[in-house]
Image (cartoon, rainbow, N blue to C red):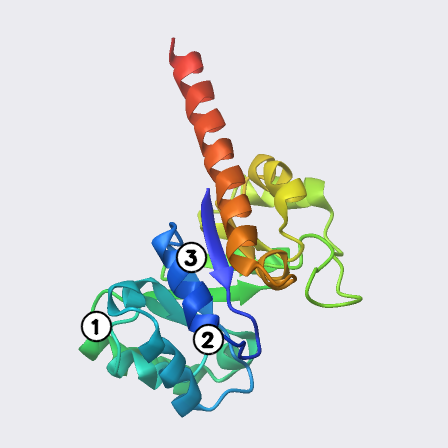
Amino acid sequence: MKLILISHPEYLTNESRFLNRMFENGLEILHLRKPSSRKRKMAMLIADIKPEYHNRIVIHSHYSLMMDFPLRGIHLTESQKRKKLRTWIKQKQLLLKNQNFTLSMSCHHLKELKKNLKKYAYVFLSPIFQSISKKNYGSSFDLSEVKRVLSKTEADVVALGGCEIANFKKIYHLGFSGAAVLGAVWKTNDPVQNFLNIRREILYIKASRNRLRIAEKN
């Protein structure tokens, strides 16, 4: 079960320090999402993150930054998916620079999981639960239907929306491959400790799953 952190949508004081500490403590994937940011300011934040962690960063905008930093990949938002030709050209340009970059995207309807999604490393499905970071943004999914669809899709699907510690076991049993967290980390003044608590729970779930697999084999 993978854990993905989505950045706060606004720039925070000491944000790069927070992120560096999270990377040092096991953060494997950061989605850098700053909807209203200028390219230059986003580049400055990336530059403040230690270079050894750049290959763990996925960006939601200003894709040309992939040319300037050895980033992990790009994420297609709803607006980018609508700009099909422009996005296709950008992807081809990026492939010339980095053959190994990952591609991910956002989904908001179960029918999207029935499409051919092989080119995506993973996709977000949201909102699964009541959002922590967005007021009045709750789930309209029938979770039993979500579980049925996930059991049949070949896509690597990550839950987004209301992903906090109390919901992680449910996320795992629904069949998601991971969880993307935002509000659960950034909602207090100690985001690093929030991240550590969440990562500890994910590791516990992974260990429990491994113990169960071993017991089933024996």
Q: Tag on residue 181?
A: none
Task: Classify mark 2: residues with Cα within 10 Å, few (<14), some (14-19) or many (20+).
Answer: some
Q: Which three-letter amino acid code belongs to the residue tagged 2?
A: His
Residue 129 image point, x, y percent = 70, 52
Total tally of numbered discs in the picture:
3
Secondary structure beneath dot 2 equals loop
If you read the primary sequence from the N terminus, does the residue marked by circle 1 or circle 2 appear first? 2
Q: Which residue is mark 1?
A: 98
Q: Which three-letter amino acid code belongs to the residue tagged 1?
A: Asn
**Gap in Å between the C-alphas at discs 1 and 3?**
26 Å
Viewer-closest of 161 and 114: 161
Q: In which image quadrant can residue 12 be found?
A: bottom right
Q: Which residue is mark 2?
A: 60
Q: Disc 1 or disc 3, which is closer to the eye? A: 3
Q: Tag on residue 22?
A: 3
Q: In which image quadrant can residue 127 be found?
A: bottom right
Please determine whether, in this image, residue 144 is positioned above or below residue 120.
above
